Image (cartoon, grey):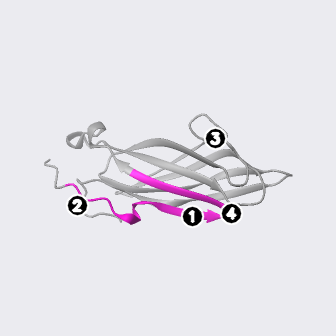
Amino acid sequence: MQKPEERLPRAHDVYESVTEGVRVRVRPEFRDDQSDAANSYFVWLYHVEIENHGQRTVILRTRHWIITDAQGRVTEVRGAGVVGEQPILRPGERFEYTSGTPLKTPSGFMRGFYEMEVEGGGRLQVEIPAFSLDSPYAENRLH
């Protein structure tokens, strides 16, 4: 399979959502150097920035990802924290990390949420915006 021309980055390749003052930004990045199109193996990194613009401290306790490939196959990933951490975000603080996912198709999308513990009691489900996983091998881009 020949690789078509690379597309130029677009400003809207950063996806953002805000839940009760907690902003989540995601920037996906296709990794051709880790992918193998001939064997239907496509890899993306996703860079995540979480900022607390609220008035209370929050602790990221769990994550829940819903990953859908171009053929509609869904994989759910749940676990404690992110990249082995459960970051504490005081008002005005930010946490960034990078992770990745492979797909068997050249495009797909991800979405999900973080479960946050709120200082003083309570829980907060923070939305992770849906974001597109597009590679230069995709015939029809989802985004």
- Identify the amino acid type marked 3: Gly
Bin the neighbour count of mark 2 within 10 Å (Cα to Cα): few under 14, some 14-19, many 20 and up.
few
Label disc, if present, on residue 21 of the rendered structure: 4
Q: Quadrant of residue 13?
A: bottom left
Q: Earlier in the sequence, mark 4 or mark 3?
A: 4
Q: Residues within 10 Å of mark 4 (few under 14, many from 20)?
A: some
* Label annotation for residue 81: 3
Secondary structure under badge 4? Answer: loop
Q: CA distance from mark 3 to mark 2?
A: 35 Å
User: Which amino acid type is marked by label 2?
Assistant: Glu
Return the disc, 1 or 2, that comes first in the chain's sequence. 1
Q: Earlier in the sequence, mark 2 or mark 4?
A: 4
The part of the chain drawn in magenta is 6-28
Residue on which the image places disc 1 = 17
Q: Is residue 100 left or right of residue 24?
A: left
- Rendered image: mark on residue 139: 2
Helix, strand or loop status at disc 1: strand
Determine if the magenta segment contains residue 127.
no
Location of the C terminus (image quadrant): bottom left
Q: Are marks 2 and 4 in contact (CB under 8 Å)?
A: no
CA gap, disc 1 to disc 3? 19 Å
